[in-house]
Amino acid sequence: MEFSKIKKISKALSDDNRLKILLAIRKKASCLQCTEIYDMVQLTQPSISHHMKQLIEADLVLYSKEGRNVKYNLNKKVLNEYIAFLEELKES
């Protein structure tokens, strides 16, 4: 994993609200729609959009559009790569 990607992921994970959003998506165990995120984390729509943009740009969240609805999923592949990097760092 490139350092620029690690930095972007670390920055995305450094915000409490983004962590809450990731936990909300994980709790759902499948995909989550924006309205469901709103109900779970109690943030305004513009705030959720801002945080989702950061999570998507860091590749932590994948999304798909179905009409006017957007569904979000955790990108487990990237999360596992990031965790592997941290594990490697710990071993050094």
Image (cartoon, rainbow, N blue to C red):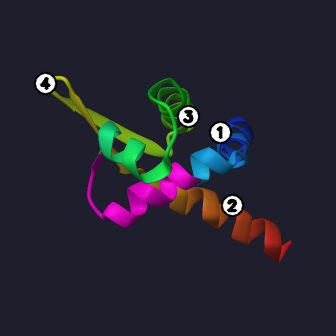
What amino acid does circle 3 point to? His
Q: Which residue is mark 1?
A: 5
Residue found at x 18% / y 23%: 68
What amino acid does circle 4 point to? Gly
Residue found at x 73% / y 47%: 14
- Location of the C terminus by quadrant is bottom right
Q: Which mark is residue 51?
A: 3
Cα separation, mark 1 vs mark 3, equals 17 Å
Percent position of residue 82, x then y: 62, 57
In terms of sequence position, does the residue under pointer 3 or pointer 2 come before the other?
3
Callout 4 touching callout 1 (CB < 8 Å): no
Badge 3 marks a residue whose secondary structure is helix
Q: Which is closer to the viewer, label 1 or label 3?
A: 3
What amino acid does circle 2 point to? Phe
**Category of crowding for the residue at label 3, using alpha-carbon neighbours closer than 10 angstroms: few (below 14), some (14–19), many (at least 20):** some
Q: Which residue is mark 4?
A: 67
The stretch drawn in magenta includes residue 28: yes
Quadrant of res 90:
bottom right
Cα separation, mark 3 vs mark 2, equals 24 Å
In terms of sequence position, does the residue under pointer 3 or pointer 4 come before the other?
3
- Looking at this view, name the residue that lies furthest to the bottom: 91
What amino acid does circle 1 point to? Lys
Q: Which residue is mark 2?
A: 85
